[in-house]
Image: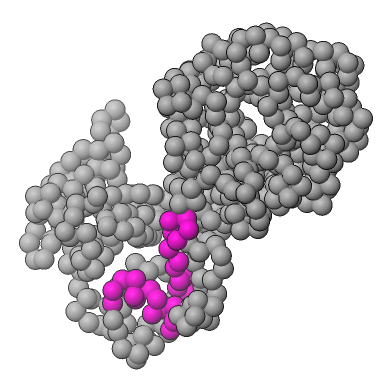
Amino acid sequence: MKKIEIMDTTLRDGEQTPGVAFTSTEKYNIARILIEEVKVDRVEVASARVSKGEMEAVKLISNWGAQKGYLDRIEVLGFVDGTTSVDWICEAGAKVMNLLCKGSVRHVKYQLKKTPEEHIKDIQNVINYAHSKGLRVNVYLEVWSEGIVQSPEYVFQLIDSLKDYEIERFMLPDTLGILHPEQTYQLVKLMVDRYPDLRFDFHAHNDYDLAVANTFMAVKAGAVGVHTTVNGLGERTGNAPLSSVVGVLNDFCEGIELNVDEKKLGKISKIVEAFSGIRIPANKPIVGENCFTQTSGVHADGDNKANLYCNNLIPERFGRQRKYALGKSSGKASIQKNLEELGIELDSEAIRKITDRIVELGDKKENITTDDLPYIISDVLRNKHNDEKIKLLNYYICHARNLKPVSTVSLQINGEVYEETSTGDGQYDAFVKAVTKIYEKINKPMPQLVDYIVTIPPGGKTNALVETSITWYLGREFKTRGLDSDQTASAIKATMKALNIIEEMNFGTNSNSD
């Protein structure tokens, strides 16, 4: 088995996403999880000389890496700038420099205004100095994809002049994302065949949405390392996403071995989503909310009979579960799958009526989730579930300038009335804390808020309806939504739905959200 290294550059190249800047603590935690839990082989954590914050982050990560024995897996981008980058990296406590060199003669001529020989001499001087300071060195050939197409003689001149130095990896970036898969294979193979004793990494960008395909072809051509970012963060359209690269290489590259733990990909994606503020698209492969969700009733029926609509990307590989969406394409099989998830048993006539109602709601573009089913069942069958066990009788929220918001809440729970008042960091927080006081008093478990999304229709009108979608956890994850012209009121409606779902389904009643 051929070992393929994954070098993740979320904390360096990924941070070049517009609007993204990680704190030193965030960088430390991302690096720690990538190395210890996701088990990527290497992480590129920063660029030298950028800021005091970068220095602080690299020191924090390097101190941890030194204690854990991971220093050789922590890398910092350095520049051909004499002794400056090397000294910066040494001060930060790192031991591996990824030296950014020009991989295209046009960049040498027009950006540096030097000859190839002058640039090569500068590179050699930096490498010699880095080695004298005890650093290990990898070399980036910036804009290599342009250089190997337009000036291959320069690329070969550069590598020939460096191949006898102690350089551990030559890294081949498609900096502008200009390659297609066939080109990638041919050009990487050209490098591997010409220099069989050197180790080559491939670094893809996604301008044509081909970063994953190009990474795959680079490995097929003989690259022994590939670069990724979590959620595909990066300049312009981003880099090759870690999760997709791992899935593709594991399933389509025979005779290779990866260290990455697939079950941890979802965790790191969510953490980077939270720290970066860049949301994961719902349809993103492997880590997106909808990627393991079937919508068509035909698909649910086929899965019921023989898993006919499943591929090798089974959700259990990634610590996920398959779901069946509810909407106008739903059939009885989809409804049955969702009822099984909730532990509800109904006869065929009841399922037919519920299916008809869900199709009707889907025609109106209503969003329907598994957790809406108890309400739809109550509405359609007019049974005892029609009465909410947790009723919001009244609430009062006050927010004055320079004072913490305060909320008073009155709930009726199984016929008894309870009232509590609390302050909070925001109006909704004050409301939830007041409800939590009531629940603590009567020893009921409160769900943990996992995610909170506010959606306002385009147009910018202040009286537009607001939809608040909240993901909760209490024994399992579930989602509720509220709709109102007031954002706080819509969140409160979503919260009351959650409390009643817990009451109806009786989940989490034996455990205070572990």
Kindly identify the residue that appears in the image at 54 percent across and 19 percent down.
Answer: 94
Residue 314 or residue 111, whichever sits in front: 314
Q: Is residue 144 above or below residue 338?
A: above
Residue 209: x percent and y percent?
71, 51
Q: Quadrant of residue 198?
A: top right
Is any part of residue 19 visible from this angle? no
In the rendered image, the vertical position of residue 292 relative to residue 387, given as above or below: above
Observer-nearest of 387 and 115: 115
Q: Does the magenta-highlighted stretch encompass residue 77?
A: no
Whether the magenta-drawn stretch holds residue 318 is answered as: yes
Direction from residue 215 to residue 243 in the image, left or right? left
User: Which residues are drawn in magenta?
Assistant: 316-344
Q: Is residue 186 left or right of residue 93?
A: right
Res. 503 visible in picture: yes
Residue occupying image coordinates x 84% and y 20%: 161
| Residue in front for this viewpoint, 409 or 375 | 375
Q: Position of residue 333 (x, y in %)?
A: 44, 82
Q: Which residue is depicted at the point 45% across and 47% down? A: 264
Colouring rule applied to residues? one colour
Residue at 43% x, 51% y: name it.
453
